[in-house]
Image (cartoon, rainbow, N blue to C red):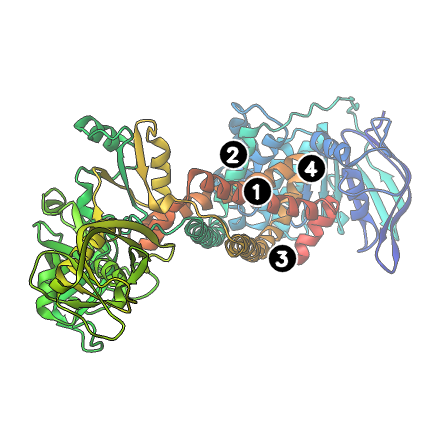
Amino acid sequence: MSVIKLENVSKYYKSVETVSMGMQKINLEFNMGEFVGVTGESGSGKSTLLNVLSGLDSYEEGEFYLFGEETSHFIISDWEKYRSAYVGFVFQNYNIIDAYTVLQNVLLALEIQGYDPKKKHERALELIDKVGLSSHIHHKASKLSGGQKQRAVIARALAKDCPIIVADEPTGNLDSKSAKQVISLLHEISKDKLVIIVTHDFDQVEGYATRKIKMHDGEVVEDKVFDKPAVEANIVEPVIKKMNFPTLMRFALRNLFSTPRKTFFLLLMQMIVMLAFTLIYASAQSAMLNQNTANNSVNLNVPDNRFLVEKRDGSDLTNSDYDYLESISEVDAVYEKGLNFYNDVELFVYNMDRLDTSNYYYIYEHFTISGTNPAKLLSSKEFTGTMPTEENEIIIDDPTGKFEIGDRIILSTISGFNDTTEIENQKIQEFYITGITDDIHGDDKSNGYIYFSEAFLESDAVDPIIENEDRKEMVLSQMYDNPFMVEDNMVLLYNAMTIDDSTNIPKIVFYTDDGTHAPFEDMDVMTIDVTIDGFVYDYYDWQSEGVSKSFVINDVEVYTETDDEYNLVMINTAFMNLIEEGQLETFKSIYTSVARDSYSISVSSLAAGNRVLDRIDTTLYRVYYPANVPVTQSIDVIFLNYFYNILLIVFGLFLYSIVHAVSKNAMRSRSKDFAIYRSIGAQQSIVARLVVIEQVLISLFSIVFMMITLIALSFFINRIATYLTVLTFVNYLYLFVIFILFGVWLGLRFNKRVFKQSVIENINLSKEDN
């Protein structure tokens, strides 16, 4: 039985406009032990015949018998199995993997057919020695001569141990000496195989060929047998072993490391894109996080990297509480005297060594404190100067750009001064600047953070009760709008006149309508309790709706003449003083802050704070975290969140369109390699998986290098360090999945392009690209 038999086989090539004939009505049989030389002029159809015989190309008419079995029903996977089990290839253009060494090229064929991993290296060396390339085992194929390349390809073909060897112009690019060596080698292996050689010069194989086939215009015009083979064809059912995942991984890694420049370029490109996308994503996450939290008007100076903790039952915090809180992951520091941070006091910084000549209302350079923090958590790269060690030393932001190291500053609750004595009298603390940060906290140049020394934070320097002088003046100024009743008459304080009678008894005097009045002793006198209906609107708090409270002044003497119309009221200074005292006492909570017995917990960022918050036992502790307070989302915030997401998607697509364009060109340059894999029997599914694995590996390496780069940059760029803390494990997982899926997508896109064509079309296309 013949190995291959063709009956009326025809092949046509179709283009958009024409249909051309490759070969027609071919009737041939081939047997084991034959050394067949196929010759003819260019375009005669000899290469087409070889491609059909080897399963590299399809046929349109007739029947192709393999060991007596029809193949017209074969699909792509069947032809892949045929090439894998039965056919070895030697091409004119070598079709060798240039980036591989000689050893790797031979191992390629062994791995594709599932050769025993323990024996494949020994077998490869044996075949390399057989073709005379033992001294070039580790030489890259690109560095070999033409003859050496062909011998390496023959070794690769022999590695498959297949019954059919096809060679397309194997000596076309060789000198006469190398050509003779290649032909001799092919003849030697033809004793127990079927060897078919296409050549334009039959003289080169005449001394070796057992048969000559001549083609012309797609037809066989001569079929001459010189010597009949003595080898009988044995029908052997092919055993196809699939490449397991570890082998595919080694395969993929070999491909990447064999082209270091190309791999490095793709890694660098993807890493830059991933880095840009990650930073944009982190920025968007940070912006959305800030949009979804409210500005707390109670704990004014508690920034997003600090929060307060107290016992839920109101009891005092103890050392065991301190140890518990300090042991929580991502807690940077715990401070027992949380009140030393001035958490709920509106404070202003005044530079006593720098005059502000731009504004009469303020005579010293100043800014509003928007956050207080421990100085020890600042890294050396975050500020200029030295770390404060004494109670009266401090590091500050410099939003105005007019503060210097060594300047004396004071903290005060007063928002404006135009008198030096008043400033000194109203200060609550005094410090000397030892360091200035590079950050500006706030929307403008009027807000900044201050950073206390450990000595100050552990001291008893802070009074737990602090009055805000601005708010105190506000409470007093609204006193004059308070009404009170004397019998059936309402009196407004701002309509009354004050007199000083040098007594401590509160008095009210009503005048008659003619403007005259008698001495107190000549008037009717009564003693009553006067209720003052107080109301204060806190215009420092935009959320305030005003506070209404009443207070009583007892034993007020009221002087009046009965049966007269009262149209003028006078009060003495004693009564006015009591009203002031009552107003201040009644509305004391508006202008007075009383520090709670709480610990201050410092973390690296809002994201870290949220994670720590989840770890604290809230059944035992009450946590005040202003930055974590969710805000009811307005339409603007919802729209902004959607906008961030859409912008992120658009930006991501733009970046990855760049990567896709670059990767597509890089992968196109490898079309030849993947066509070679398929030509030597790698199944389509194996090549497809290999491509995807390579792209995923590139993405994985890019992710690793990106993270290393981000961590390195975070040591020098504070904003990047902040971004790293904003991103949670879920965020990183989300990014990881996106990047890996993109690698898979690139691989699938390339596969779609590769498998549209037959193997020979891919090989020819790669020649054109190169």
Q: Nearer the viewer, mark 4 or mark 1?
A: 1
Q: Assess disc 4: are there few (<14), some (14-19) or many (≥20) residues with their C-alpha within 10 Å of its C-alpha.
A: some
In this rendering, position of residue 203 left or right of residue 20: left
Relative horizontal placement of residue 549, taking residue 762 as reference (left or right) = left
Q: Could you tell me residue 766's position as x and y percent?
A: 66, 53
Between discs 4 and 1, the one toward the N terminus: 4
- Res. 220 in view: no
Q: CA distance from mark 4 to mark 3?
A: 23 Å
Could you say which disc has been placed on residue 250 in the image? 2
| Residue at 75 percent of width and 51 percent of height | 201
Q: What residue lies at 35% left-to-right and 31% top-to-bottom?
A: 615
Residue occupied by mark 3:
770
| Proximity of marks 4 and 1: CB atoms separated by less than 8 Å | no
Q: Is residue 156 above or below residue 712?
A: above
Q: CA distance from mark 3 to mark 1?
A: 30 Å
Secondary element under disc 4, as helix, strand or loop, is helix
Dot 1 alpha-carbon crowd within 10 angstroms: few under 14, some 14 to 19, many 20 or more: some
Instruction: Tell me which residue sits at (20%, 26%) in the image.
Output: 320
Please state which of residues 625 and 46 is positioned toward the viewer in this rendering.
625
